[in-house]
Amino acid sequence: MKKLVFPFALSLMLSAGQVWAHADHLKPQFGGITADADAFQVELVSKGTQIILYLSEHGAPVESAGASGKLIVLSGKNKEEVALTPSGFQNLSAKLKNKPARGSKAVASINVPGREAGTVRFTLK
């Protein structure tokens, strides 16, 4: 019985450490909302009509040079589609025609050189 308990307890302790290490990779760093795109994480910050997407991988910045994408914002019956372009070391941005309403849905398709393409969905606050 003791031979079975020790390996089981050890595996629980090791797996808890792995979960803990990834527990904070989706915490907002720039005051926005976050989502996972599998190959990287994205934080959306909305400032009026300006949308900024910050790219990271488990908290470390992902360089946006050469990256591109598309952002679709659904606000009530309105749909707006804009191109995302690099606007800083780790971010992409777009300018909307109108400020999105609270509760609007946003979908971003992002292509980063050397990584798998990612799609993320957000509900704006």
Image: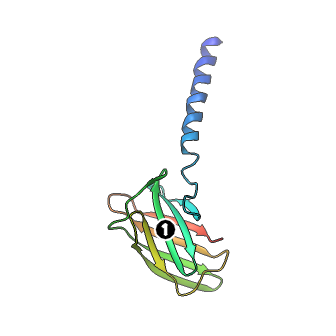
Quadrant where the C terminus sits is bottom right
Quadrant where the N terminus sits is top right
Report which quarter residue 31 is drawn in: bottom right
Q: Could you say where residue 66 lies in the image, as x and y percent from the top left? A: 32, 68
Q: Secondary structure at mark 1?
A: strand
Answer few, some or many: residues within 10 Å of disc 1's Cα (few below 14, many 20 plus, some between 14 and 19). Answer: many
The residue under the point 40% across, 58% down is 62
Q: Amino acid at mark 1?
A: Leu
Please tell me how many numbered marks the rendered image carries.
1
Q: Could you say where residue 119 lies in the image, as x and y percent from the top left? A: 48, 65
Q: How is the image coloured?
A: rainbow
- Residue carrying label 1: 53
Q: Could you say where residue 5 lies in the image, as x and y percent from the top left? A: 64, 18
In this rendered view, identify the residue nearer to me: 77 or 26. Answer: 26
The residue under the point 40% across, 68% down is 88
90 to 76, vertically: above or below: above
The residue under the point 48% across, 64% down is 54
Q: Could you say where residue 44 lies in the image, as x and y percent from the top left? A: 54, 67
5 to 16, vertically: above or below: above
The residue under the point 40% across, 72% down is 87
Q: Residue furthest top?
A: 2
In this rendered view, identify the residue nearer to me: 69 or 66. Answer: 66
71 to 58, vertically: above or below: below
- Looking at the image, residue 75 sits to the left or right of residue 66; the answer is right
Report which quarter residue 75 is drawn in: bottom right
In this rendered view, identify the residue nearer to me: 48 or 104. Answer: 48
107 to 6, vertically: above or below: below
